Image (spheres, rainbow, N blue to C red):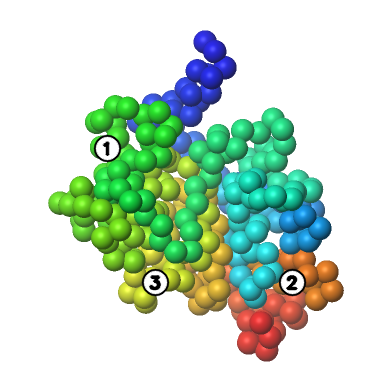
Amino acid sequence: MSDAQAKQMALVGGFASTAAARAQAREAAAVGATKIEARAFSFFYGAFQALDAITIAIPQGEVTALIGPSGCGKSTLLRAINRMHDTTPGARAEGVLTLDDGPIYGAEVDPILLRRRVGMVFQRPNPFAKSIFDNVAYGLRVLGERNRSVISERVEWALRRAALWAEVKDRLKAPGTALSGGQQQRLCIARAIATTPEVLLMDEPCSALDPIATLKVEDLINELRGEFTILMVTHNMQQAARVSDHTAFMLMDAQTRAGNLVEFSPTGQLFTNPKDQRTEAYLSGRFG
């Protein structure tokens, strides 16, 4: 077997058996164990330092929220986890960033295999110019799955997990772009989880949605808790309080302009009894 064939098998692995294996692994793993860890992790865009020595341990199977003023590095940290900055000229990382104790950065790390494990949902819904079915099936086909029955099963599974199946099951051939904004975002979540990642990154997933659609996405996040490790950026502190188990508060240093982690605690503790005066000032609206 060639190296290319071995890589393809690692990517595909048979989605039915892969999903079962992942489910067993999640059940066996202790919820709350560290899934993602940063140790003195810094990130640069050329000469500009966006993150300064971030140290944080993201618990497995839980929802972690990143809050803080605009420009404090929340999205940079989120996107660093699945290496979305790789094609940005001058972008580079320093320090340690790991997934299950394995490095995220390094010459030995295959970004494609990494992104197979780490899904991403963006701020604005971005369905492809394809049918609802083909939007969800896209990642499966990219990874080499050709069995129609397997693809159909995975598409239905993902749409059900995204609480969208009942609304679209009779129009799977309709364009994904014809759905409402909230439905499009749930379609994008279905597309992200169809390949059964271990981690789901969400960059302000409700900022472009109305309150009703926001509530549906928040309900979905609560449904996915435990099955996926979810890390989300939000400017809505009430949303962080409603859906997250842990919350990290970040600030931009006034002199260096780099993002710093101020406090990371269980959400209830951070909102009711913050340890840092800057956290309390931000939560009370005195700055930010």
**Residue 272 visible here:** yes
Mark nearer the N terminus (1 vs 2): 1
- Position of residue 89 in the picture relative to residue 115 (left or right): right
Helix, strand or loop at label 3? It is loop
Helix, strand or loop at label 1? It is helix
Position of residue 179 measured from the top left corner of the image (x, y, whole percent) = 27, 61
The label on residue 252 is 2
Position of residue 107 measured from the top left corner of the image (x, y, whole percent) = 72, 33
In the image, residue 183 sits, relative to residue 111, either above or below, namely: below
Mark 2 surroundings: few (<14), some (14-19) or many (≥20) residues within 10 A: many
Position of residue 231 measured from the top left corner of the image (x, y, whole percent) = 55, 57
**Residue 39 visible here:** no
Mark nearer the N terminus (3 vs 1): 1
Closer to us: 224 or 152: 152
Mark 2 near mark 3, Cβ–Cβ under 8 Å?
A: no
Mark nearer the N terminus (2 vs 3): 3
In the image, residue 42 sits, relative to residue 148, either above or below, namely: below
Residue at image position (37%, 34%) is: 141
Residue at image position (79%, 48%) is: 95
Q: Of circles 1 and 2, which is in front?
A: 2
What residue is shown with label 1?
153
Mark 3 near mark 1, Cβ–Cβ under 8 Å?
A: no
Amino acid under label 3? Leu
Mark 1 surroundings: few (<14), some (14-19) or many (≥20) residues within 10 A: few
| C-alpha gap between disc 3 and disc 1 | 29 Å
Amino acid under label 1? Glu
Q: Of circles 3 and 1, which is in front?
A: 3
Residue at image position (67%, 70%) is: 71
Amino acid under label 2? Met
Position of residue 15 measured from the top left corner of the image (x, y, whole percent) = 38, 31
Occupied quadrant, residue 288: bottom right
What residue is shown with label 3?
209
